[in-house]
Image (spheres, grey):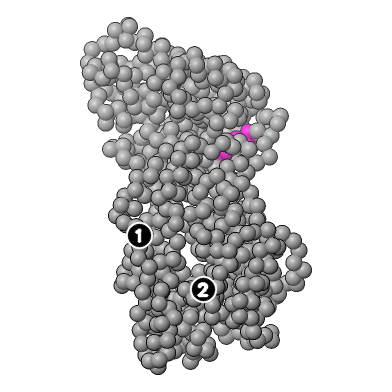
C-alpha cells in the first residue's frame, strides 16, 4: 500500500492507474479495476489526530459505540473502495461542511472546551479533501461508463430502539430520484432481503429506520446527475454493540453475502443504465492476484508442502504382518509400524495460525485459505496420533464417518444381483506397468511408474515424486486395469500436473474435502469411460461396511472374518480391505469413495466439472474456483480426464445409474 498525498492520488485517478493507497492518513482508497461502481465506508474510521485526543471528553469505547466499525471489511472484496480512517467525532463525513464538527452528539458534550477556529478549520479541510477525492473518482467513473453506482455503507445501534424489531438492512431513499432509480433500489432491497445470517432473523426495508439524509447522498445528488448513491445501514448484529467485539461467524457470512449482493445489483444497474453491460459478475472484479494472497500462499506452501497423509499411514511391515495374521489362523491383531513424523506439531500449529490470512480482502478467497489452514491443523493432529488410540478420533474429525444413507446405499448395492460376466484376473503388476506407460503417451504426461510392495491399494499416486505406484501383488482383468488407469492417471496424476501449473500453490496442497472430491471424480472417470461395473461398486460398498464396523469398535479379526463369511471375499482381498480401514488406528477415509461418486455424478449432470481439475480441489469450492478462473487468477486445467477430452463412445448404463440413484 502506498502512502500518498492528495495530489498524487488525484493524479493517479486522472491517469486511470490501479493502486491501493493511504492518502494523507485520512482515507484508504483501492482501485483494482476502473469499473462503474464504488463502495464507500465513511464512518469506519476511529482515529483522532493528536491535538484532539486530550480535548475530547469521550473515551475510545464511547466513540466506537457511535462509529461504524467493520463496514470497511464489508466492502473490501470489491474492486473500488474508499474508506475513511478518521473518527466521525473529528469530522462527520455524512454531514455538510457547515455542521460536520460536533459540539454535542447523542446527548453528550464532545469537547472539554469549544474548539478554536483554527482547529475546526483543520477538520473542515480534511472533510473537503475526502470529497475532492470521492468527486474525482465519481467523475472518472462517469466519464468512462456514463453512469456510476455508489454503495454508501453504514451500520447502526439498535438495542436502544423500542417497538418493532428493526430490519437488519435499511435503505434510505429520501434524496434519490425514485422515478429514475426505482428498479435498482427495489432490486437492492430484494437482494438484501434474501440474505441469511447464522441464528439471526434477517430482513431489509426502505426508509423504516433511516431515510438517507446524509451528506454523501447530498453530495452525489448535487454534483453528479448520472450517479446513484445507495445509503445503506446494517444493524450491528455482527458485533457486540456495547463492547465493539465482532461475532466472526456472522461477520464473515455477512461479508460473503454482501459480496454477492453488491455484484448482483451492480449487474442489474448496468443492464438498466449502462450502455456496455458486463456478461457476468466476475467481469466486474479485479483480474490481478492480490499481493497479500500471493504472500499468504507462498508462506502456506513453504510450511505445508510434502505432508502426504498416506506416506505416514501406510504400514511399513504390511507383508510381514499379513503372513503372521494368516499363520495364526486369523486370530491375531496386526502390529503395524509406521514412518516417523519429522514435524514438530506444536511449532507447526503455531506457525500455521500465525499466517496472515486476515490480510486477504476478498472474502471468498480469504475463507478458502482459512479453511485450508484449519484442515492442516486437523491433519497434523491426525498424523501425530498414527498408531495410537487417538488416531480414530482425529480420522473422524478429518474425514467423517458413514451416514445412515451411506450404509443403506452400501447394503442396497451388495444385495444387487450380478448382471455381467466376470473376467478372469490374469494381468500382473509388470503388465499393468506397461499399460500405464502406454497411457502416459495418450495423456501427454511424463511421470514415473514403479512396482512396489509398500502400499496396500492396487495403485496410488505419489504427488510429491510424481510417481504412480503399483502394488506388486495386484492381479486384474482388462476392465479393472482400464478403470485403474483412468482413476490414478486420469484424475489423480492429471490434477497433480495441473496444480503444478498454477501460480497459487494452494492447489498443490489441497483444499478441505479434496480427498472426497478426488476419489469421487476418479470413480466418475471409471464410470464415464465404461469401466465401472457392479463388482467395483460392491467393493466400494464393502469399504463403507468395513469402516462402519471399525467405527463401532469391532476388531480387525472380526471385520476380516465378516468380509469373508458374510460377503464372500477371499482371504487376500479381505485382508487388504480390512488393513486399509484399520491402518493407523482406524482410517475412515474409505467410505468417501462411494459418497464421492454419488456427488460427483450429481454435480456432473448439473454443472461444469472442469474447474475441479485445476488441482487438488473440492466440490465445496467449485463456485470460488470458477470465479477465480473467470477473473484470470487461476489457469484453466491443461490436462483433463479422457472422457472430457473426447467422445469415448460409451453407452449409458441405466442399471448402474439406477443402483446409484436408489441411494438418494
Which quarter shows the C terminus?
bottom right
Q: Quadrant of residue 161?
A: top left
Q: Residues within 10 Å of mark 1 (few under 14, many from 20)?
A: few
Q: What kind of element bears circle 1?
A: loop
Q: What kind of element bears circle 2?
A: strand
Q: Are marks 2 and 1 in contact (CB under 8 Å)?
A: no
Residue at the spot 67% in from the left edge and 77% down from the top edge: 479
Task: Where is residue 258? Give x, y as percent.
Answer: 50, 40
Q: Is residue 262 magenta?
A: yes
Which label sits on residue 452?
Answer: 2
In this view, the residue in front, 613 or 240, is 613
Which quarter shows the N terminus?
top left
Q: Magenta segment, which residues?
A: 261-269
In the figure, is residue 306 to the left or right of 178? left
Task: Where is residue 582? Give x, y as percent.
Answer: 40, 77
Main secondary structure type of the part rendered in magenta: helix
Q: Nearer the viewer, mark 2 or mark 1?
A: 2
Task: Where is residue 517? Give x, y as percent.
Answer: 54, 62
Which label sits on residue 69?
Answer: none
Q: Is residue 69 magenta?
A: no
Q: Residues within 10 Å of mark 2 (few under 14, many from 20)?
A: some
Q: Quadrant of residue 598?
A: bottom right
Residue at the spot 74% in from the left edge and 61% down from the top edge: 646
Vertical placement of 419 versus 35: above or below? below
Residue at the spot 37% in from the left edge and 56% down from the top edge: 377
Vertical placement of 532 versus 235: above or below? below
Which label sits on residue 342?
Answer: 1
Task: Where is residue 126? Give x, y as percent.
Answer: 41, 15
Amino acid at each position: 500500500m502506498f502512502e500518498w498525498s492528495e495530489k498524487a492520488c488525484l493524479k493517479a485517478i486522472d491517469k486511470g492507474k490501479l493502486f491501493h493507497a493511504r492518502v494523507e492518513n485520512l482515507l484508504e482508497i483501492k482501485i483494482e479495476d476502473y469499473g462503474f461502481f464504488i463502495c464507500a465506508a465513511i464512518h469506519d474510521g476511529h482515529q483522532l489526530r493528536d491535538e484532539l485526543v486530550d480535548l475530547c471528553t469521550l473515551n475510545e469505547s464511547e466513540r466506537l459505540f457511535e462509529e461504524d466499525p467493520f463496514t470497511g471489511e464489508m466492502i473490501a472484496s470489491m474492486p473500488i473502495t474508499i474508506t475513511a480512517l478518521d473518527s466521525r467525532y473529528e469530522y462527520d463525513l455524512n454531514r455538510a461542511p457547515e455542521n460536520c464538527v460536533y459540539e454535542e452528539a447523542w446527548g453528550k458534550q464532545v469537547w472539554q472546551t469549544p474548539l478554536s477556529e483554527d482547529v475546526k478549520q483543520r477538520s473542515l479541510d480534511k472533510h473537503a479533501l475526502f470529497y475532492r477525492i470521492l468527486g474525482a473518482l465519481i467523475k472518472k467513473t462517469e466519464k468512462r461508463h456514463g453512469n456510476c453506482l455508489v454503495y454508501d455503507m453504514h451500520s447502526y445501534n439498535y438495542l436502544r430502539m423500542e417497538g418493532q424489531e428493526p430490519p437488519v438492512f435499511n435503505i434510505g431513499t429520501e434524496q434519490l430520484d425514485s422515478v429514475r432509480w426505482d428498479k435498482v433500489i427495489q432490486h437492492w432491497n430484494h437482494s438484501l432481503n434474501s440474505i441469511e445470517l447464522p441464528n439471526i432473523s434477517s430482513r431489509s426495508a426502505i426508509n423504516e429506520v433511516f431515510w438517507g439524509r446524509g451528506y454523501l447522498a447530498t453530495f452525489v445528488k448535487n454534483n453528479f446527475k448520472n450517479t446513484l448513491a445507495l445509503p445503506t445501514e446494517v444493524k450491528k448484529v455482527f458485533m457486540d454493540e456495547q463492547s465493539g467485539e465482532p461475532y466472526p461467524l456472522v461477520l464473515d457470512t455477512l461479508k460473503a453475502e454482501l459480496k454477492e449482493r453488491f455484484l448482483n445489483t451492480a449487474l442489474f444497474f448496468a443492464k438498466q443504465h449502462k450502455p456496455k453491460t458486463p456478461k457476468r459478475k466476475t467481469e466486474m472484479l479485479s483480474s490481478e492476484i492480490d499481493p497479500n494472497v500471493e504472500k499468504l500462499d507462498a508462506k502456506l506452501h513453504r510450511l505445508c508442502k510434502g505432508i502426504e497423509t498416506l506416506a505416514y499411514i501406510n504400514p511399513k511391515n504390511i507383508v510381514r504382518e499379513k503372513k503372521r495374521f494368516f499363520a495364526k489362523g486369523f486370530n491375531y491383531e496386526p502390529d503395524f509400524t509406521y514412518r516417523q513424523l519429522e514435524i514438530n506439531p506444536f511449532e507447526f500449529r503455531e506457525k500455521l495460525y500465525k499466517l496472515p490470512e486476515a490480510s486477504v480482502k476478498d472474502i471468498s478467497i480469504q475463507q478458502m485459505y482459512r479453511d485450508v489452514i484449519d484442515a492442516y491443523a486437523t491433519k497434523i493432529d491426525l498424523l501425530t496420533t498414527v498408531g495410537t488410540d487417538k488416531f480414530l478420533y482425529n480420522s473422524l474429525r478429518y474425514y467423517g464417518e458413514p451416514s445412515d444413507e451411506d450404509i443403506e446405499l452400501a447394503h442396497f448395492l451388495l444385495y444387487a444381483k450380478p448382471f455381467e460376466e466376470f473376467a478372469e484376473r490374469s494381468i500382473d503388476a509388470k503388465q499393468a506397468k506397461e499399460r500405464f506407460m502406454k497411457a502416459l503417451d495418450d495423456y501427454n504426461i511424463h511421470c514415473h511408474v514403479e512396482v512396489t510392495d509398500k502400499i496396500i491399494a492396487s495403485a496410488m499416486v505419489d504427488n510429491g515424486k510424481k510417481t504412480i505406484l503399483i502394488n506388486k501383488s495386484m492381479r486384474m482383468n482388462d476392465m479393472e486395469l482400464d478403470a485403474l488407469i483412468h482413476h490414478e492417471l486420469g484424475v489423480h496424476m492429471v490434477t497433480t500436473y495441473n496444480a503444478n501449473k498454477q501460480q497459487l500453490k494452494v492447489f498443490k496442497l489441497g483444499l478441505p474435502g479434496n480427498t472426497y472430491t478426488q476419489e469421487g471424480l476418479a470413480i466418475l472417470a471409471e464410470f464415464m469411460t465404461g469401466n465401472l461395473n457392479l463388482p467395483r461398486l460392491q467393493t466400494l460398498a464393502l469399504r463403507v461396511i468395513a469402516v462402519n464396523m471399525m467405527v463401532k469398535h469391532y476388531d480387525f479379526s472380526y471385520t476380516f472374518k465378516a468380509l469373508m463369511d458374510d460377503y464372500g471375499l477371499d482371504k487376500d482381498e479381505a485382508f487388504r480391505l480390512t488393513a486399509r480401514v484399520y491402518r493407523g488406528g482406524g482410517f475412515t477415509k474409505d467410505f468417501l469413495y462411494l459418497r464421492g461418486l454419488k456427488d460427483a455424478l450429481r454435480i456432473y449432470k448439473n454443472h461444469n466439472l472442469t474447474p475441479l481439475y485445476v488441482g487438488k480441489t473440492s466440490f465445496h469450492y467449485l463456485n470460488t474456483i470458477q470465479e477465480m478462473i473467470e477473473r484470470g487468477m487461476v489457469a484453466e486445467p491443461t490436462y483433463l480426464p479422457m472422457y472430457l477430452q473426447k467422445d469415448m463412445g460409451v453407452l449409458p448404463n441405466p442399471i448402474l445409474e439406477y443402483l446409484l440413484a436408489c441411494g438418494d
